Image (tube, helix red, strand yellow):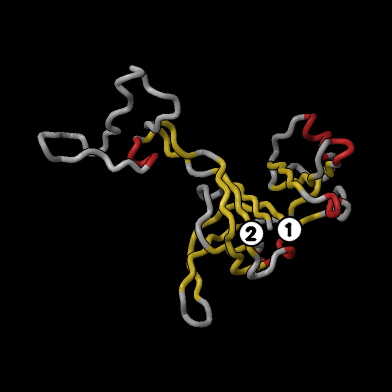
């Protein structure tokens, strides 16, 4: 199993040998350090915890947990098979060299927050018509209840807070790996703004 933590930089395009353009997202990364190995006997599941990034603000509990491995801004766990857990030990580093061009990966991150949005943007409603005497109804939700029960059912699609949620995109392709610049090029769009923490797993 391959995994790494990275930071979203920007989107661009690169050209292949035949001159075709491919949209890619540029991810910037640095080696992640293994901070803990979780086992099924002790923790109930098997996982590898890694630290990424740097920060100056760590409390005593966090400093005691990471010991002298570094002041990590992020700690993330990756579930791994029991057979693979033995190949990691605390203090090991995970870098870009684990990935190769052509790898299919699963990418997760927190999407952009969009605030309170109406039903047209949030759920793709068509809105109302401008015919038969209607005015100002282009983006209204329309009827929300039923005559019989005299109430609005739970789960009805309405306006509300949108974005800021964890999103996972599967089946993305690694287009280019540049270890000397700590950059990973992934084909397609990836959730989040610039600077978002991204999890890349194969």
The CA distance from mark 1 to mark 2 is 9 Å
Name the residue tied to disc 2.
105
Please state if 192 lies on the left or on the right of 137 as rendered: right
First in residue order: circle 1 vs circle 2: 1
Crowdedness near tag 1: few (<14), some (14–19) or many (≥20) residues, C-alpha within 10 Å: some
Please indicate whether residue 55 sits to the left or right of residue 110 in the image.
right
> Quadrant of the image for the C terminus?
bottom right
Q: Nearer the viewer, residue 14 or 30?
A: 14
Q: Residue at x 32, y 41 (%)?
A: 125
Residue 77: image location, x then y, percent: 73, 44
Q: Nearer the viewer, residue 116 or 127?
A: 127
The x, y position of residue 200, in whole percent, is 65, 54
Is 199 on the left-hand or right-hand side of 148? Answer: right
Residue at which label 1 appears: 2
Residue furthest bottom as drawn? 18
The residue closer to the viewer here, 34 or 124, is: 124
Give the number of the disc on residue 121: none
- Tell whether label 2 touches label 1 (CB within 8 Å): yes
Instruction: List x then y, in percent, for residue 32.
Output: 74, 52
Q: Does 49 sit above or below residue 9?
A: above
């Amino acid at each position: 199993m391959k995994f790494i933590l990275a930071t979203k930089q920007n989107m661009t395009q690169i050209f292949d040998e035949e001159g075709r353009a491919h949209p890619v997202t540029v991810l910037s990364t640095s080696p992640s350090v293994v901070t803990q190995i979780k086992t099924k006997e002790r923790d109930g599941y098997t996982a590898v915890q890694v630290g990424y990034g740097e920060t100056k603000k760590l409390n005593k509990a966090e400093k005691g947990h990471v010991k002298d491995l570094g002041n990590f801004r992020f700690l993330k766990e990756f579930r791994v098979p029991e057979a693979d857990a033995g190949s990691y030990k605390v203090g090991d580093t995970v870098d870009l060299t684990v990935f190769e061009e052509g790898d299919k990966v699963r990418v997760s991150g927190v999407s952009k927050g969009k605030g309170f949005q109406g039903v047209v943007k949030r759920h793709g409603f068509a809105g109302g018509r401008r015919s038969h005497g209607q005015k100002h109804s282009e983006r209204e939700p329309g009827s929300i209840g039923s005559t019989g029960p005299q109430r609005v059912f739970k789960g009805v699609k309405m306006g509300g807070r949108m974005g800021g949620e964890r999103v996972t995109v599967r089946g993305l392709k690694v287009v280019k790996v540049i270890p000397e610049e700590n950059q990973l090029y992934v084909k397609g769009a990836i959730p989040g703004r610039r600077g978002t923490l991204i999890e890349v797993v194969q």
